[in-house]
Amino acid sequence: MAHRLFGTDGVRGKAGDYPLDHETVARLGGALVRAMGGSATPGRPLRFLVGRDTRESGEWIERELARGVHSAGAEITTAGVIPTPAIAYVTASHNPFEDNGIKVFSGKGEKFTETLEREVETIIDDRTWSVAGASDVPVDRTDVIDAYIAHARLALPDAERLGPFKLAIDTANGATTTVAPRLFHELGFDLHVLSATPDGRNINLDSGSTHPEQIAKAVRALSCRMGVAFDGDGDRAIFVDAGGRVVDGDAVLLMCARHWKTGGRLRGNAIVATVMSNIGLEIALRDSRIDLVRCAVGDKYVMEEMIKRDLSIGGEQSGHIIFSEHLFTGDGIVTALSVLRVMAESGRELADLASELVTYPQVLVNVRVREKQELAAVPSIAEAMSRVESRLAGEGRLLVRYSGTEPLLRVMIEGKDQQQIQAWAAEIAGAVREQLG
């Protein structure tokens, strides 16, 4: 079996260490060419477009990827520092600077399927081929920022309907620094920009979507109507309302789904969210007669369900939101513009829109196990789970699953009463410890 390189969102790790060491990155470039048909037709070599965020390791990773691509007979063009979704649009991260990752999109702007990922991993493991040449291979350069901004602006066609609007944004010293300030200035916002001085090592450092307290503080201090915090590579966004309260992806999914349905834009009368989205989202959507399709964690799984069912909206609580009329990948800037469009067309402020989501209390208990048995085959555990599910009766949610990396069983319950669900989680955890602990 081939070594697994791809996780839920590309190839990730510490830059310089496997799987982001020099040789593996170069082999990845070569394997991608081979998986996509080699050097394509004579006279028309396969072409790759690469972009990166502001991490200091980005330049050498780009060079090694180019070495592998060229070695396999294809060509590569760089767009420099640019948000991930901009690369997805033209072709087609929230970790510290010493980490990095490689995300792969098809020519349709869709993330690679697991089938293609496994094929690439198998090719990399095949030692009958190697990557030749030095890292100074020719790499063409192009500027796709204008094209991406023009595309993104379609998400907010009538910005003037918002009236005077003081907006704060946090670009996390990342890839959106090249796009977001310019775009929002051009749209006429009274803009205040945080964390927009990247130095290669400060990406996501006490900033961006993983530290929304920074944008919340700025919104309150500057009396802004809204704040938006992007992550380092620009594919997700977290919001704060005028009072500095955080608005996450679940609230964004709900307000957009309801507004899209009112406007006749919600295809399939359903949206996609992962198993981590709160039961409050599911109940609120049910009240609006909108179906919720759940999938595994990872926006590539959201994308796959959206494509399969031809749906308009999907996303994650963490702020990865996909609007299929724009792209089949998360786009923090388009998400921000889409929320602003809901505000403009509804005449409502963000706090009012977000208040429609009632987030239910959640309990998560991790139980260490000696073996990972099928839970349905252990009567006492199955019975405990069945009792809890009957008590929840559509007004809560039980999710029990094994960790993929540790000898743990995770018991997650959402319901109306915190103490009650804590007791129910303890009941299941007790049965697990007795049988598998």
Image (tube, rainbow, N blue to C red):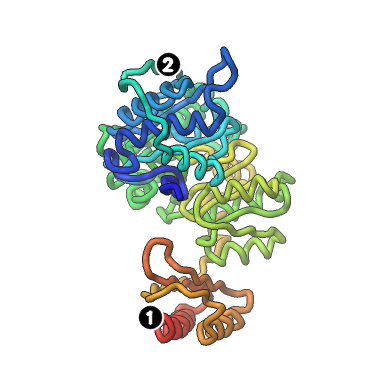
Amino acid type, residue under disc 2 in the picture: Asp
Amino acid type, residue under disc 1 in the picture: Gly
User: Is residue 302 shown left or right of residue 203?
Assistant: right
Circle 1 SS class: loop
Q: Position of residue 14 (x, y in %)?
A: 29, 44
Of callouts 1 and 2, the N-terminal one:
2
User: Is residue 278 shown left or right of residue 419?
Assistant: right
C-alpha span from label 1 to label 2: 57 Å
Residue at point 31%, 18% (across, down): 136
Circle 2 SS class: strand
Along the line of sight, the residue nearer the viewer: 317 or 338: 317
Residue 181 visible at all: no
Query: Relative to 289, is 330 above or below?
Result: above
Which numbered circle lies on residue 237?
none
Q: Position of residue 357 (x, y in %)?
A: 56, 61
Location of mark 2 (residue):
140
